[in-house]
């Protein structure tokens, strides 16, 4: 994760950044992907940004919500 700016958009559909996801994990104690989705709306549209196994887009994401969550849990 150190290679990414905090302003990097993890969820392009909802424009959710690494910083926003980290914020809900740290300040709102989000402990699951579902909680991250509920608090940020990331991964609630096309769902490709949640985890690699669910990324069916033509161009694969470079980082997923799961990657960020795993840094804290």
Image: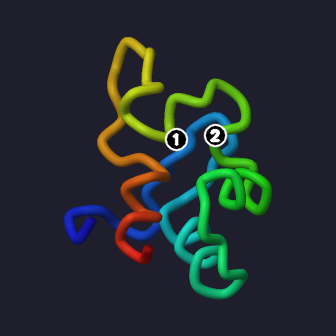
The residue lying furthest to the left in this view is: 3
Question: As rendered, which of 10 and 64 lies closer to the eye?
Answer: 64
Q: Quadrant of residue 3?
A: bottom left
Residue 32: x and y in percent read 61, 60
Q: Which mark is residue 27?
A: none
Question: As rendered, which of 6 and 40 lies closer to the eye?
Answer: 40
Residue 16 position (above or below residue 68): above
Residue 57 position (above or below residue 52): above
Q: Seen in the image, is 43 located left or right of residue 8?
A: right
Q: Which residue is identified by label 1? A: 50
Q: Are marks 2 and 1 in contact (CB under 8 Å)?
A: yes
Residue 62: x and y in percent read 30, 42
Q: Residue at x 43, y 24 (%)?
A: 55
The residue lying furthest to the right in this view is: 38
Q: How many residues crowd mark 1 within 10 Å: few (<14), some (14–19), many (20+)?
A: many
Q: Seen in the image, is 9 located left or right of residue 36?
A: left
Q: Seen in the image, is 1 located left or right of residue 20?
A: left
Q: Quadrant of residue 67?
A: bottom left
Q: Residue at x 60, y 30 (%)?
A: 47
Q: How many residues crowd mark 2 within 10 Å: few (<14), some (14–19), many (20+)?
A: many
Mark toward the start of the polypeptide (2 vs 1):
2
Q: Residue at x 48, y 63 (%)?
A: 18
Report helix, strand or loop for mark 2: loop
Question: As rendered, which of 56 and 14 lies closer to the eye?
Answer: 56
Residue 2: x and y in percent read 23, 71
Q: Residue at x 65, y 34 (%)?
A: 13
Image quadrant holding the N terminus, namely bottom left
Q: Which residue is identified by label 2? A: 43
Q: Seen in the image, is 38 located left or right of residue 14?
A: right
């Amino acid at each position: 994760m150190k290679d990414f700016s905090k302003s990097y958009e993890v969820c392009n559909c909802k424009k959710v950044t690494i910083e926003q996801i980290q914020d809900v994990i740290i300040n709102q104690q989000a402990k699951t992907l579902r909680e991250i989705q509920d608090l940020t709306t990331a991964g609630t549209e096309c769902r490709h940004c949640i985890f690699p196994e669910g990324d069916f887009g033509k161009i694969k994401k470079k980082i997923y919500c799961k990657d960020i969550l795993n840094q804290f849990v």
